[in-house]
Amino acid sequence: MKTRISELLNIEYPIIQGGMAWVAEHHLAAGVSNAGGLGIIAAGNAPVEVVREEIRKTKELTDKPFGVNIMLLSPYASEIANLVIEEKVAVVTTGAGNPEKYIPIWKEAGIKVIPVVASVALAKRMEKYGADAVVAEGCEAGGHIGELTTMALIPQIVDAVSIPVIAAGGIGDGRGLAAVFMLGAEAGQIGTRFVVSHESIVHPNYKKRLIDSKDIDSTVTGRSTGHPVRSIRNQMTRQYSKLEQEGKSFEELELLTLGSLRKAVVEGDINNGSVMAGQIAGLVSKEQSCKEIISEIIEEADKLLKVK
């Protein structure tokens, strides 16, 4: 299954792993890359030396291409922008901001630049400034989201830019991957399903909560602040929603969620932590290796696309 994305990134299959904070570290990134996709290390808000160590540990586990996701609101973003050049990382994806000022130095270093976007306007701007591709993420995704659905967003961005488009949000199996190909995407970015992979270091409580999830179990909080986040309903999301309805300030709401993702991922507190997950959590029924996940998705998508 060759596309412009698989050729651009020198990967076997057009599957990109989502850059999930606290989740996407060296074990998962290497696992996805070794299975033929593109593994991603999430820099999140980590200091530069922590990210350097993650990059080097990934290199010890795989000789395949992998990338780093840089959150541009991080206080360490500028340092990490230079770090990926020093460490000769193959691909950079970006979120939570505009990477324009970094694109020239990354391109000069031979790094493939793929910003995550949630609108046609931003996709066009990223193409103008030299991005190699974009990840167009619909609101079905877990974590921080935009407003448009994947079904509506992908074809509009595909029509607006000439660079390849990677679809994200709502892809949990081969049917989802085949669907976004039909919408014009040339790869799929997958997050939630990889959270429950064998290689994922996520706490067993978190994995079990995703596997046990039903179709209606995710919710979005933070719309009142302009920072919507999708996660699995729990005590924390109910309390957050209550405070939102009471009109509490952004600062008060932030206090509730401070450290909540780490609480869920590392400590396994699925009641008070932030159990970020996409709407496809209801499709996830078992823990598998990255290789098994990717092989299953590609085989199913390939059969469907040949029928079409």
Image: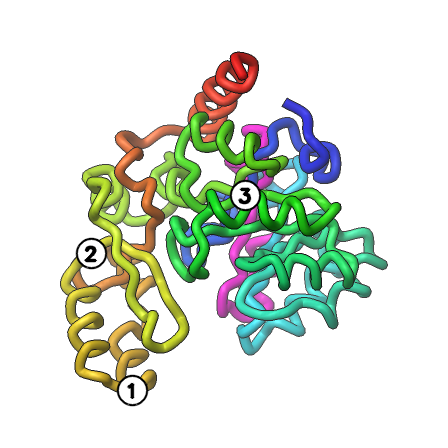
Residue behind mark 3: 167
Name the residue nearer the viewer: 58 or 176.
176
Q: Secondary structure at mark 2?
A: loop
* Chain-order first, disc 1 or disc 2: 2
Write down the region rendered in magenta. 29-57
Query: Residue at image x 85%, y 59%?
Result: 108
Instruction: Count residues near mark 2 (Cα–Cα under 10 Å), then give few for <14, some for 14-19, many for 20+.
Output: many
* Chain-order first, disc 3 or disc 1: 3
Q: Position of residue 76 (x, y in %)?
A: 58, 74
Instruction: Count residues near mark 1 (Cα–Cα under 10 Å), then give few for <14, some for 14-19, many for 20+.
Output: few
- Farthest residue, direction right: 108
Query: Residue at image x 71%, y 54%?
Result: 113
Q: Is residue 29 visible?
A: no
Quote the CA–CA distance across marks 2 and 3. Answer: 25 Å
Instruction: Count residues near mark 3 (Cα–Cα under 10 Å), then give few for <14, some for 14-19, many for 20+.
Output: many
Amino acid type, residue under disc 3 in the picture = Ala
* Chain-order first, disc 2 or disc 3: 3
Residue behind mark 1: 249
Quote the CA–CA distance across marks 3 and 1. Answer: 34 Å
Residue behind mark 2: 233
In which image quadrant can residue 115 be found? bottom right
Name the residue nearer the viewer: 31 or 19.
19
In which image quadrant can residue 273 be found? bottom left
